[in-house]
Image (cartoon, helix red, strand yellow):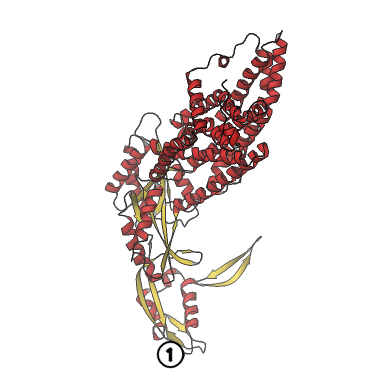
Amino acid sequence: MGLVIDDVITMIEHLARRAKHDGDDANNAEDGGDAVLAAGREFLPPLTGSSMATLLVFLPLAFLTGVTGAFFKALSLTMAAALVISYVLTALAVPVLARLLVNFQRWQDPGRGPEGRVGRAHRWLLERLFRRPWLLALGVAPLLVLGWFAYGHVGSGFMPKMDEGGFVLDFHSAPGTSLDETSRELAQVEAILRATPEVATYSTRLGTGLGGGLGEPNRGDFFVRLKSGPRRPIEAVMAHVQDDVGRAVPGLNIATAQLMEDLIGDLTAVPQPIEVKLFANDPTALAPAARKLAAAIARVSGVVSVQDGIVIAGDGLTITVDPARAAIEGVDAQFVSDALQTYLAGTVATQLPQLTKQVSVRVWLPPEQRKYDDQLADLPIRAPDGHVFALGRVAQVAAAPGQAEITRENLQRMVAITARLQGSSLGSAVAEVKKVLDQQGMMPPGVRYELGGLYAQQQIAFAGLSRVFAAALAAEFVLLLFLYERFWIPVIVLGVSALSTTAVFAGLWVTGIELNITAIMGMTMIIGIGTEMAIFLVSEFVDLAREMPRRRALLEASRSRFRPIAMTTLAAILTLLPLALAIGAGSGMQQPLAIAIISGLIAQFPLVLLAVPVLIGLTLPKAERQAEPAPS
């Protein structure tokens, strides 16, 4: 909304200033009206350039993919459409309405009066900077230092933190627990949820989930919706429920997450913020390494609900065929293996044709007639020559208790250590986890790791948004080069816009907001907004330079554009203020974006009005730089 209003405010200010100036000696109102239309035509080139500058920022967002693209495609297309409509209405409708509704013979422009304190201070400061450009460094250096300090201290996350009005409680009982036993434990959890005053309602899923993972009878989740109105913050409610369940149902492992985080985790098959994937060619090395690393990660501050990723599926059997003894019976290891497969799992006897496919018909023994464990050694096997021998004569059968589930990724054996966060940002927690992983002796030989989970999604999103940021800079550079046909003007304008983004880190650090995908989106928008402001100023300078010395034109352009830039900056800040204060349902989602834009605007306002004209002045020939601007 603020970006749309900016064009209208700037056009009206230009019409008021130009039309009244040109119509001072007019004999009738129609002369002033004609001046309005002439001023509208005069303002069309800078209006077109400024609208293009903002539009070019949103276009690359439409090409984002994955989770980030899902969030920002609709926003980018909406903003682009709104900017196009705003441009058309501002260019065509605003001058016509001003001509019809305003009598410029009687109306007095407040800006035409004596220069006020702010205007005099602006002129005084600008003149001093023209004489001593090195003073700019004294103003820019603190901004750079503050931005660098804030960058090192602001936390980073993936999605904005907000009260979504509900949360998901993931649970799993001990491996091998039956549905009946898990249901009994869940009844205790339901009693705790009913006793929690903030809980409005809940639903349960057992043995299934939203993602594409394997459904097991000991796993599931609760979807909990909280009551509206005054209540404890959602983080406090989640911590209270988790503590109560931990005490009352010690056999149940639980973890809580808000809805958006859990939904993204399920859809991307990485439901935990932290996931450390261990790979090894030797499967016997994975379990000890996972247990050791999980114990070390659990000591990291802010990391909770650490799981070593080892899921015991049950006992197993190891059958070792002796080739020499098998040869005596006239068989080999493959023959014995096929006989066991037929005995334990049956065999496909035929295919049953259906309309669209063939269905295999498997023939096997009833479960009660199958022998396991020590009885399996007595299994009769018929040799090719017709004689029968017991399995124990050619193979050794041994029990292998506590067999873990086998998980593979890209055909490699893998164990995933997962953890959740509590009171810590994703970036800082993962940085501490990396320190643990890089400790000498932590990873045994032959075992390597990769980081997954929501952290991996965050890195993918940040990389995509960084490319959008770079594309926006390149597009703005080409636009400015096309508008002004001078190399140094795009460099100066984009340098000032990029410098103002350092204030974003300071704003996030002061407000305690993490750097996430919406904050980076706001940082990218600052480039477009800053370029838009600078285009109005530079276009004014180019017009004035045809009538007066260029150094004086820079001073007058900054003075004449002071009011519209101040008005548009204030309008944008006031428009975004409710979002920055998280006023209203769902506003927390865009709070980082609003804070990022407001912080950038606060830094951009003086930079555009002071740094841009002074730096452009430094590109003028030496004789023009040393000439004193004539007083106005």
Task: Give residue 47's quadrant in the image.
Answer: top right
Secondary structure of the residue carrying tag 1 is helix
Q: Which quadrant of the figure contains the C terminus?
A: top right
Given residues 172 and 142, the one toward you in this image is: 142
Q: Is residue 517 left or right of residue 246?
A: right
Given residues 386 and 607, the one toward you in this image is: 607
Q: Is residue 604 left or right of residue 50?
A: left
Can you say whether 386 is above or below 425 in the image? below
**Position in image of residue 132 (x %, y %):** 49, 33
Task: Give residue 564's quadrant in the image.
Answer: top right
Instruction: Evaluate whether residue 49 shows in this view.
Output: yes
Residue type of the residue flagged with mark 1 = Ala
Kindly identify the residue that appears in the image at 51 percent across and 21 percent down.
119
10 Å neighbourhood of mark 1: few (<14), some, or many (≥20)? few
**Position in image of residue 71 (x %, y %):** 54, 42
Task: Give residue 163's quadrant in the image.
Answer: top left
**Position in image of residue 137 (x %, y %):** 46, 38
Can you say whether 287 is above or below 114 in the image? below
Kindly identify the residue that appears in the image at 49 percent across and 21 percent down.
120
Kindly identify the residue that appears in the image at 41 percent across and 81 percent down.
320
Instruction: Evaluate whether residue 168 shows in this view.
Output: no
Q: Which quadrant of the figure contains the N terminus?
A: top right
Q: Which residue is mark 1?
A: 324
